[in-house]
Structure formats: structure tokens, C-alpha cells
Image (tube, grey):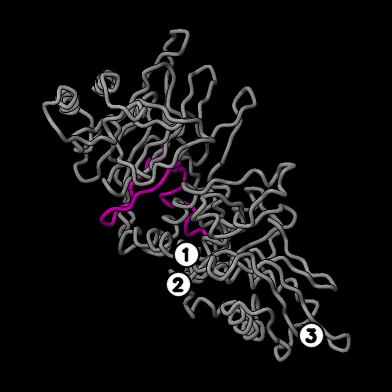
Amino acid sequence: MTKRLVTLVLSVTLLLATVLVAPETVLAQQEEYFPENWQAAERVILSAWDNYEDEADVSEFNIDLDDTDVFCDRLSSRNPEYFYVTVFNIGYSSASDYVLTVYFDYFYTQDKVVEMREEIEQKANSVLNSIPDNLADEEKLLFLYDYIASNNNYDFLVFSDYNENLKPEIRTVYGCLINNLSICEGIAQTLIYFCKRLDIECYAVGSDSMNHEWNMVKLGNNYYHIDITYASPGFEKDTEGGQFQPYGYISHDYFLISDKQIKSLDHKGWDIPFLATDSTTYEKAYWKNVFGQVGFVDGFAYFIRNGKLSRCNLSSGAITDLYIIPKCYFKSKDGYKRIWVPYTVTDDSEGSGFHTIFSFDYERNNLYFEMGNTAYSYNVNTKSIVSVYSLSKTGYILSLCYKNNRLYMTTNDINDKIKTEAFYFGEKSLSADKLPDYTGALFYAGDIDLNGKIGISDVLALKKYLAKAVAEISLENADINKDDVINLLDLARLKVIYMNMK
């Protein structure tokens, strides 16, 4: 987190994020957080920003000069839609202790701002429209928590010697939603944006001692902490010091927790004047000890916890176990058989075994999960479990994530050689720092007949195509090795994929 400060010259950098619709009910926030005279000044300043004006007269609102940095910081947090405001200076009189005028500048041209706002609106509407119907506010927040954690990449350049090259968008909703690259401020601002659209009271919580920012939301009469930045580990180090990204790993330890709980997770020094209560409402919620994207279908939440694929009835709270994740064996590089044991934890233990990472596909209502060296899908409609991909070599799947119609996996070859690669049914793509954009691509490379799975019918269809017996197939899915040519090499690869999935 970069704290905004005001000196006697009173120059404050505002790097604001992006929202488009702000319900009036949400703007009327706690008096102690943002007093009425600040709210009145805010309306004048926002009008000036909307019209790309250079200054705003706030002399009638009696904003104390000593409160200027707090006012500016909270003004930013409340209004993440104004991502394009860069710097504003404060004008005051030596005979007065109040701010008289606010002056500002802008990052982009007005035309550029219109274009960027349209991008935000389209993306945000798509996300909000994908939230299943009839969810309670806590489930809506959980959906957004998982979405942001799955799709945003933390910009670790902020910790390097090259941080002067950072783009301002990393602190904004534009960076988080459009570029999928931001730091804690951009992540916190993004949740505020969505909460405004959903009419959920939400705040940014800053800690100078941690150099960090997260969120606090109000549900019922209680406040709860949410830290999406800490939900995903970003990049971890392997045994040789290299970095890898565990695709799909989402911890829910930082979702809807109390002061006591977040302090136990080493958070401290936050700057909000009212505290979260020590409510235990969600202390034993179904998402605890869950490491993946929870799926919501027809009034149920689907997830994997303590070695079981389960669902929770959102009306009654009853949890039903659908499938017990078994132990499994696979071979290491030296030929020895190794065991993969699903992670389990009890109230009095630290847990043991491998986390079962899972991810949800709303298009097909599939929950994908890894077990040893194989990725499986569970379809909530048919209640069937099928293997969708198996490693052809030794090792196991460390984690996986479904997004943009692709299943991404992180693998380990048992000798702690962790690979950050994207797989799509047998073919590996580029390394993690050069992943291509798969947006809009079809899901299964090798799914020639587009029936949602790979089978003998796909092998036969490709054979017929190469023999010129059929004229039309899915060319995108037939080019399995992605060399822009469909030939016998693709057929050979498809046969390997099919045999591995039998």
C-alpha cells in the first residue's frame, strides 16, 4: 500500500480505481468515517472530475487543514471510478485553518477515459451478470473473492529496483479487471467497486506498518475483514529458488473474519475508526479449509474440503458429502511408487496431506479437481466423475485453475522440479511469464466433435478429415500441437491423449 500524504504544500497523489454506478445508499456511510461536511465537499469535487475541470471550491464546507490527508485518502477509497485523477493540490489561507480550493490534474485525455470506462463497464457487467441468482450477500462476496483471486496477478515489480516503471493502473480497478495485474490497493478498490454495485457497505483498510491495504464489509450489524491479496500466494519458490505460480490455489482464511482472527494472521495497525466485531458467525462456515473456487448451482455450494467433494444447501446449511477423494499412487522419475494423500484437518490439528485444489466451470457446471497425476471433472447435473487429463510423465498435478475456457495446471515431477506451465489436454504452452491469451478459445484441444469430452469419436473424426472424407471439423481443436497445421502429428498426439484418458 502507498499511503497518500499531504504536506503544507499539500500535494497528494491520487491513484484511483474504477466504478461506474454508485448507489446513494452506499454513499451515505458512517458519519465517523466520512462526516456530512466531507460528503458535501465530495459532491462538488466529483462534479469537477466528471467535467474534467482543474479545480473545485470547497471553502464553504469547513474541511480542517489537519484532516486533509485523511479526507483525501478516504475520498479516493469511496470513489474508485475516478482512476484518471493523478495529482491534486490544496489551496488554503494563512488566516484560516480550512481548505479553500482543490486543484487537480489527469492521467489521460477525456476521450481515453471514456474508452477505459467502457472497458470497465463491459467487464464488470459480465462478472456481475455471472453471479448466480438468489445468493445471499455473503455468497455474492465469496463469488467475487474467488473471481478476483483467480484472475488477478500481483505485480511483484513493486518490490523490485525497477518499481519506477510501474504503471499507475496497478492501484486501480482498471488494472485489476482489465489488465489482470494490480497490487493490494487495486484489489481492495475492485471489491469496493463491486460492493457499490451490489449495495453492500465496503471500506478500504490501510496499515502503514504492513504497507498493505485490504477491505472491511458490513453484513447485518457486524463488520468483517476480507483480504483478497492474501487469498492467493501469487508466486512461490521451489527448492532451487525459482518461482512458480500455483494456479487455482485460493485460501479462504481471509474471508469474512473478525479482528481477533485477522490479528492471528499477522495483520495489524489498520486505520479505520470503527472495528470489526468479534462475531463468530462465519467461523465454521463451509468455505473454511477450502482451497479453490466454490461453485454455486441451484441453491447449493459445491467445494472440496477435508478430502471430500461436498455440497452445502444454502437454505438449510446442511452439508452432503458427494465423493471421498481417495489416496492414489504414481511413479517418481526414479521409478519408485509414491502416494498422494488428500489434505484433511480437524479442529485440533494443523492438517496433513496434499491440498486438493479445485476450480469451477459455470458454462458446463463442472468442478475440476486434481488427484495425483490426473485432473478430474465432477458434473453437478449428471453427478458423474470423469478424468479429463493425465500426466504422461512421472509426477503429479500440484494445482489447477479453469478460466478463459482453458484448464491451467502447475505440475511437480517429484524431484521438486516444479513447472509453471499451462496445459490443455496433453499439450503444454509457453512458460508462465509468456502465457498466450486464450480468451474465447474452445476448451478442449482434441475435442473434434465438440461434445465436451475427448473420445474415440474425436480420433475417428480427425482420421476422416485427414483422409478428406469429411470437410468440416473444429480446426481450433484439431490443431493439437498448435503449429497452425493439421496433420498426422496432431492425430498421433490425439491418440496419446485419448489413451491417457481411458
**Which residue: 75% across, 75% down?**
68
| Earlier sequence position, callout 2 versus callout 1 | 1
Label 3: state its secondary structure.
loop
Q: Nearer the viewer, residue 80 or 433?
A: 433
Q: Earlier in the sequence, mark 3 or mark 1?
A: 3
Q: Nearer the viewer, mark 3 or mark 2?
A: 3
- Image position, residue 384 (x, y; %): 21, 37
Q: Residue furthest bottom?
A: 60
Q: Secondary structure at mark 2?
A: loop
Q: CA distance from mark 3 to mark 1?
A: 34 Å
Count numbered badges in the picture: 3
Quarter of the image that includes the C terminus: top left
* Local crowd size for mark 1, using a 10 Å CA cut-off: few (<14), some (14–19), many (≥20): many
294 over 374 or under it: above or below: below
Earlier along the polypeptide chain: callout 3 or callout 2? Answer: 3
On residue 98, the disc is 3
Q: Is residue 364 left or right of residue 344?
A: left
The quarter of the picture where residue 33 lies is bottom right
Q: Nearer the viewer, mark 2 or mark 1?
A: 1
Secondary structure state at the residue bearing disc 1: helix
Q: Which residue is mark 2?
A: 199
Viewer-side residue, 83 vs 237: 83
| Circle 1 residue | 194
- Camera-side residue: 311 or 48? 48
Q: Which residues are magenta?
A: 280-306
Q: Amino acid at mark 2?
A: Asp
Question: Per the image, is 129 magenta?
Answer: no
